[in-house]
Image (tube, rainbow, N blue to C red):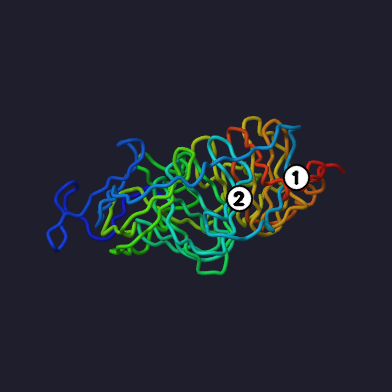
């Protein structure tokens, strides 16, 4: 959530001399977006961040899409996606377009290097597991239900405190921010927003590493993954301030907006980015008009694809889905509750469902790696 934060030691004035006890200068780094016109932070390093000992290409980053076939609703059962590797190695991308890639990660090993995405922000939803993000901005703990927003260019790694974890991963090509309609002209969240600044957790502790040795940072940029070796610890910041930093927001702190009749999906919106939005479906009271139908009406996403990741509870409009299910309802096809779900919802007072939805305004393409998890009977599940 963009607001001003300061951690550690910084000079009184920016771009002025800031010296160590031995008289040497600290190295000031401006980390900003959109040239010099976006949000930014100033970071003060013990070592020059430009000093690289070795650079080696690891691989190209490429998602192999399936061939186009008949458009249909899709369902992928990801719960048994194989666990293995560290947080970066464990990623399995299921669908993507030019704006966002969506997948699952089940890491069971610690990262012995750091990672930096130089192509866009990342959004990590913690389904299972506990741990912390170690970054140049400090340490940020996470537990199940947390959204973790990692800005472009952040050097970080995920350290697990549980044997393994399960994440929903969004690799974005743009900034991920709270919806504009919930912010005033100064960026402050408004009274009708389903969350407020108190709900957002910023880095909790800045741990400065003044260490020499060999340290690896893997950087994603220009469609490649490159390994950079430094002779100093990359988390050597003595202090920083600004508006650009990782933060956490728990889905359990999202306050649902309800009404006398069924509310449309935008009331669940939590984040927005270029050409897509992220929504949170959380436990909530149902509509209270005496003739209300709590189940959603059939709707046609004529200009967007709808991806739903099922986290927990009994999703009242669907049958045959489970924890970890991903459904994709593509643009051009109407979708809605399964047979019997509309009538069954009448008279019910609440739902305990928990899910994350991503609506994209460009079609999502299925990556071949998703095929082994697909429930191919899903399209016919609306038949009587």
Q: Position of residue 302 (x, y in %)?
A: 66, 30
Foreground residue among 249 and 342: 249
Q: Which residue corresponds to the image point at 82% horizontal and 48% vertical from the top-left?
A: 340
Marking on residue 337: 1
Quick one: label 1, few (<14), some, or many (20+) residues within 10 Å? some
Q: Left of 346 or right of it: where is 116?
A: left
Q: Outermost residue, left direction?
A: 23
The nearer-to-camera label among 2 and 1 is 2
Q: Is residue 270 above or below residue 212?
A: above
Q: Which type of secondary structure does the marked residue at label 1 adopt?
A: loop
Marking on residue 92: 2
Does label 2 or label 1 sit earlier along the sequence? 2
Foreground residue among 40 and 279: 40
Q: Position of residue 108 (x, y in %)?
A: 57, 64
Q: Is residue 166 above or below residue 177?
A: below
Give the distance between the C-alpha atoms of the residues marked 2 and 1, in whole angstroms. Answer: 29 Å
């Amino acid at each position: 959530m963009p607001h001003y934060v300061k951690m550690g030691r910084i000079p009184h004035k920016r771009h002025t001399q800031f010296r160590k006890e031995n008289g040497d200068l600290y190295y000031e780094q401006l980390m900003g977006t959109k040239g010099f016109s976006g949000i930014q932070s100033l970071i003060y390093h013990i070592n020059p961040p430009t000093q690289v000992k070795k650079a080696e290409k690891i691989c190209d980053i490429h998602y192999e899409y399936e061939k186009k076939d008949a458009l249909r609703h899709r369902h992928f059962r990801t719960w048994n996606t194989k666990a293995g590797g560290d947080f970066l190695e464990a990623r399995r991308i299921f669908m993507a377009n030019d704006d966002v890639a969506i997948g699952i990660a089940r890491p069971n090993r610690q990262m012995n290097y750091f990672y930096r995405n130089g192509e866009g922000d990342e959004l990590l939803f913690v389904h299972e597991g506990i741990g912390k993000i170690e970054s140049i901005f400090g340490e940020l703990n996470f537990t199940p239900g947390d959204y973790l927003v990692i800005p472009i260019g952040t050097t970080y790694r995920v350290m697990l405190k549980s044997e393994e974890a399960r994440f929903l991963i969004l690799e974005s090509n743009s900034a991920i921010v709270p919806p504009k309609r919930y912010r005033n002209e100064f960026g402050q969240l408004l009274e009708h927003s389903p969350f407020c600044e108190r709900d957002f957790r910023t880095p909790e502790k800045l741990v400065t590493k003044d260490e020499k040795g060999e340290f690896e940072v893997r950087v994603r940029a220009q469609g490649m993954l490159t390994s950079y070796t430094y002779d100093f610890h990359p988390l050597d910041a003595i202090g920083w301030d600004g508006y650009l930093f990782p933060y956490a927001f728990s889905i359990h702190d999202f306050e649902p907006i309800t009404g006398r009749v069924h509310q449309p999906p935008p009331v669940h919106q939590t984040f927005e980015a270029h050409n897509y939005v992220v929504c949170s479906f959380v436990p909530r009271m149902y509509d209270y008009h005496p003739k209300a139908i709590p189940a959603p009406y059939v709707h046609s996403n004529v200009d967007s694809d709808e991806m739903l990741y099922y986290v927990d509870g009994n999703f009242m409009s669907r049958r045959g889905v489970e924890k970890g299910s991903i459904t994709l309802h593509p643009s051009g096809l109407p979708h809605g509750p399964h047979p019997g779900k509309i009538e069954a919802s009448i008279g019910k007072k609440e739902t305990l469902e928990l899910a994350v939805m991503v609506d994209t305004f460009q079609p999502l393409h299925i990556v071949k790696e998703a095929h082994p998890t697909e429930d191919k009977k899903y399209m016919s599940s609306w038949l009587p």
